Image (cartoon, rainbow, N blue to C red):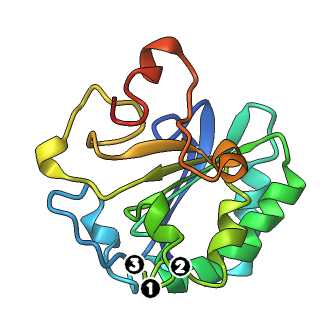
Amino acid sequence: MNYAEIKYCDIANGTGVRTTLFVSGCRHRCRNCFNEAAWSFDAGKPFSAEVEDELIESLRPAYITGLSVLGGEPMEPENQRALVAFLERIHAEFPTKSIWMYTGFTWEELHEPSNRSCTEATTRILETLDVLVDGRFVQELYDISLRFRGSSNQRLIDVPKTLAAGEAMPWRDDPVFESHSMGG
């Protein structure tokens, strides 16, 4: 797997101050995607053991809230296989830091065996996440007022609550946001 970019001290892709990894490779090709440069699986640099270790070190300071993973598309099968052990490592080493992931696949697609996004690594990855921002970016539904997402079809899913409930449960962190969190 390659990665297109790493941002340290990012405040745009989840709550608090975060380390953000942008993986390379996406087959969705959403119109007006903010990161078209990461569509190619060959974009950027190799995601090596040294890069993993640098990301781990970047998470150690107390002021870092967690890790966000975007793309490209982290849930493309080849990216899942490269990310699963890394995300499990972060989840184990930093149990109080949150892990957010952005994917163009919906929660339901990630569980649909006939969908390319449903691999042997999918459940393991989901078990490491705190928040999943799901759904493709849709230009016609673009809304600058939405928190942590670009179009109103995208959902912020509380993954632990969703896994316990067996259905997509909204992530919430404030009353204003709650009315918009699941498209409402």
Query: Residue 163 at what x, y percent from top left?
Result: 68, 53
Front one among 3 and 144:
144
| Above-or-below relation of 175 to 97 | above
Specify whether 134 is left or right of 88: left
Q: In the drawing, what numbered circle is on residue 114?
A: 1
Q: Quadrant of the C terminus?
A: top left
Q: In the rendered structure, are the residues bearing label 1 and label 2 in contact, judged by CB atoms less than 8 Å apart?
A: yes
Specify whether 151 is left or right of 58: left
* Residue holding disc 3: 25
Q: Distance between the residues labelled 2 and 3?
A: 16 Å
Q: Residue placed at 31% from the left, 79% from the top?
A: 27
Front one among 54 and 18:
18
Q: Distance between the residues labelled 3 and 1?
A: 20 Å
Q: In the drawing, what numbered circle is on residue 118?
A: 2
Marked residue nearer the N-terminal end (3 or 1): 3
| Above-or-below relation of 166 to 150 | below
Q: Quadrant of residue 71?
A: bottom left
